Amino acid sequence: MSTFVFHKSSYSNEHGDCVEAATNIPGSVAVRDSKAGTAGPLVRTSPGAWQALLDALGRAGHVT
């Protein structure tokens, strides 16, 4: 069984609270809140849906 390897956003604040994403499992992206860590919920989606979200946030000026 594969394990997700999470990476924090480069926009993480000084407390490190942010969204973490794991893209190391082919065909899947897992997203979680860094404050909750492994105890919190995990959202799993397709790479295409994840990219569409990032693109929409970028167009809205929330991601650069």
Image (cartoon, rainbow, N blue to C red):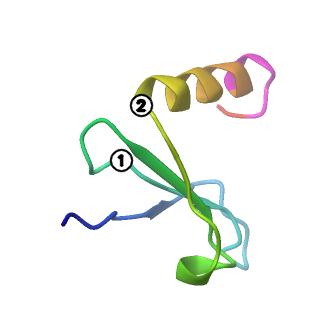
Q: Position of residue 3 (x, y in %)?
A: 27, 67
Quadrant the N terminus occupies: bottom left
Q: Position of residue 4 (x, y in %)?
A: 34, 63
Cβ atoms at labels 2 and 1 below 8 Å apart: yes
Indicate the amino acid at tag 1.
Thr
Locate residue 23 relative to residue 9 in the image: left or right: left
Element type at marker 1? loop
Q: Which residue is mark 2?
A: 47
Image-quadrant location for residue 5:
bottom left
Disc 2 secondary structure class: helix
Task: Specify the quadrant that holds the C terminus.
Answer: top right
Q: Which mark is residue 7?
A: none
Q: Residues within 10 Å of mark 1 (few under 14, many from 20)?
A: some
**Marks 2 and 1, the one that precedes in the sequence:** 1
x, y (%) of residue 59?
73, 16
Q: Residue, x 65% and y 54% (percent of image)?
A: 11
Magenta extent? 58-62
Q: Is 43 situated left or right of 29 in this image?
A: right
* Amino acid type of the residue tagged 2 in the rendering: Pro
Q: Which residue is mark 1?
A: 23
**Horizontal and vertical percent position of residue 13:** 73, 67
Q: Give the class, few, some or many, for how many residues have Cα within 10 Å of label 2's Cα (few <14, many ≥20).
A: some
| Residue situated in front as seen by the camera: 32 or 63 | 32
61 part of magenta stretch: yes
Task: Kindly identify the residue that appears in the image at 61 percent across and 29 percent down.
Answer: 54
Residue at (63% x, 67% y) in the render: 41
